[in-house]
Amino acid sequence: MNAFEIVGGKPLKGEIIPQGAKNEALQIISAVLLTPEKITISNIPDIKDVNKLIELIRDLGVKVERLSKDTYTFEAANIDLDFFHSESFRSKGGSLRGSIMIVGPLLARFGKAAIPKPGGDKIGRRRLDTHFLGFEKLGAKFVYDKKTNFFNVDASDLKGAYILLDEASVTGTANVVMAAVLAKGVTTIYNAACEPYLQQLCKMLNRMGAKITGVGSNLLTIEGVEKLGGTDHRLLPDMIEIGSFIGLAAMTESEITIKDVRFEELGMIPEVFRKLGIQFELRGDDIYIPSQKHYEVDTFIDGSIMTIADAPWPGFTPDLLSIMLVVATQAKGNVLIHQKMFESRLFFVDKLIDMGAQIILCDPHRATVIGLDKKVKLRGISMTSPDIRAGVSLLIAALSAQGTSTIFNIEQIERGYQDIDIRLRAIGANIKRITANDSGH
Ligand SMILES: CC(=O)N[C@H]1[C@@H](OP(=O)(O)OP(=O)(O)OC[C@H]2O[C@@H](n3ccc(=O)[nH]c3=O)[C@H](O)[C@@H]2O)O[C@H](CO)[C@@H](O)[C@@H]1O
Ligand SMILES: C=C(OP(=O)(O)O)C(=O)O
């Protein structure tokens, strides 16, 4: 088992380039199944989840060519639908959340699909009703086989329909959109999620010949077409990585420039960091964060305690709340972190408390953070990363802490952050990869 050993307390300095967006990559790579023609995708991050999905579609018969480190071509001309019944599909398909998004395109193009119950982080219940209720509205029949944990979906003839989504699910919306683009007639999806990942997907599908309007809103209208063709697509920089680096700079008093962030696509993320008192400047399309000894949390206009809560886009993404929480531990002032969307994503705070942070976990969704204003530094400990974002938050905490920390289960971090140890070392971090038998606390 690999672990990171980190000696903290040292400011970092330099430039860092964000990787391509993980969650966009998972949608865009699934969409290649919609056409037999060639699709070229660039800025693909070299991370576990994305590589697993590429392997999965390759096993399904997609011809995959790697043109450079981050650019691939995909050609889904010959798909082997028998692969659904293989043991390999069961283990690979079940190992990542994003694999669920191959169902929509396969259903649209071949009239059937199957997928084992997907994996992903253990951050609370992660239901898939939105996906399957949406497919059913388009005329599909689905059966969940409890014994094998497989979802089987069949539809020889998908027909456009009015669909009020059960909730604004990110992967659910992507899946239903991909099923609807080749359905007969018009589909209207209301309560659609509209994260930049989805906007990028819809824009790519339109370049392939789809007819989607309302992109960026929660009301999408899709006029079904007979077939789709090839295109080129470049992934946006990963907004969650960008947010993680802003948090890292603030916690470690580092002067960091985050390159080419596509600022206009970051929604309210920069403003939420400003609410914690973190300063930064936009220089061209780079975010420059000066070294800051202190940052002071705002209050609301009426003087009440600052609350940072997640919501579907254009609200604040839940994937950055763990990072806001760790950054708040060294702010001047207090913050209520309210994780509304996931039930078990705040439990990692016990590790931060062990490191000396002052946090009251009010219930599974809410934590009050009493900022220490750097008067008391966190101290290094051994810990295990429970999920991808908690993992990076603990990494940030460790880099700011006095002494040595060890983070176990770094596979969680590495499913979403490319070469994170190498990139952090390049800006001065004391982090090394070790092989460890212990599993931490
Ligand atoms: C591979 C991928 O793209 N994963 C992302 C995707 O997961 P995913 O698409 O699985 O997440 P969903 O959008 O379906 O739902 C996330 C959670 O929020 C809850 N929910 C959702 C919508 C809503 O209006 N109200 C509500 O409470 C759901 O019940 C669930 O617990 O979106 C999540 C929410 O941004 C992100 O955390 C994940 O990183
Ligand atoms: C929860 C996340 O990923 P996944 O949906 O793949 O589990 C995440 O990226 O923060």
Image (cartoon, grey):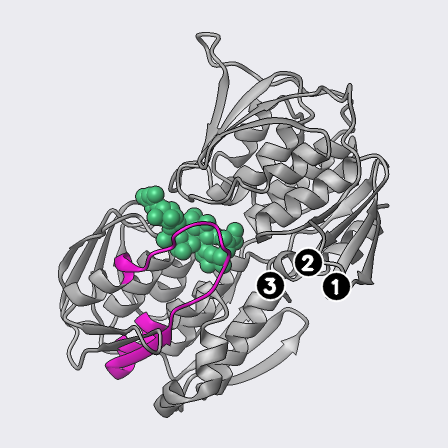
Task: Tell me if 19 is positioned left or right of 201 in this view.
Answer: right
Residue indicated by mark 3: 43
Seen at 58% across and 72% down, the residue is 51
Q: Is mark 3 within 8 Å of ligand 1?
A: no
User: Mark 3 vs mark 1: which is more N-terminal?
Assistant: 1
Question: What is the quadrant of residue 36 in the picture?
Answer: bottom left
Residue topped by disc 1: 2
Dots 2, 1 in contact, CB < 8 A: yes
Please give the name of the residue rendered at 38% of the width and 55% of the height, measured from the top-left corner.
126
Numbered disc 3: secondary structure: loop
Q: Is residue 372 left or right of residue 108?
A: right
Q: Earlier in the sequence, mark 2 or mark 1?
A: 1
Where residue 179 appears, x then y in whole percent? 27, 69
Specify start and end residues of the magenta stretch as a single range.
103-131
Figure check: 92 above or below 311 = below
Measured from the top left, where is residue 265 in percent x and y? 50, 44
Kind of residue at badge 1: Asn
Quick one: quadrant of the N terminus? bottom right
In the image, which disc is placed on residue 100? none
Whichever of labels 3 and 2 marks the residue nearer the N terminus, that label is: 3
Residue 112 counted in the magenta span: yes
The location of residue 130, given as percent across then percent down, is: 27, 57
Type of the residue with mark 2: Ile
User: Residue 360 or 296: which is nearer the viewer?
Assistant: 360
Q: Is mark 2 within 8 Å of ligand 2?
A: no
Identified at 27% across, 83% down, the residue is: 110
Say few, some or many: other residues with alpha carbon within 10 Å of mark 1 (under 14 / 14 to 19 / 20 or more).
some
Q: Dot 3, how many residues are within 10 Å of its Cα: few (below 14), some (14-19), or many (20+)?
A: some
Dot 2 corresponds to which residue?
A: 410
Q: Is residue 39 above or below residue 174?
A: below
Q: Is 389 covered by the magenta stretch?
A: no
Badge 1 marks a residue whose secondary structure is strand
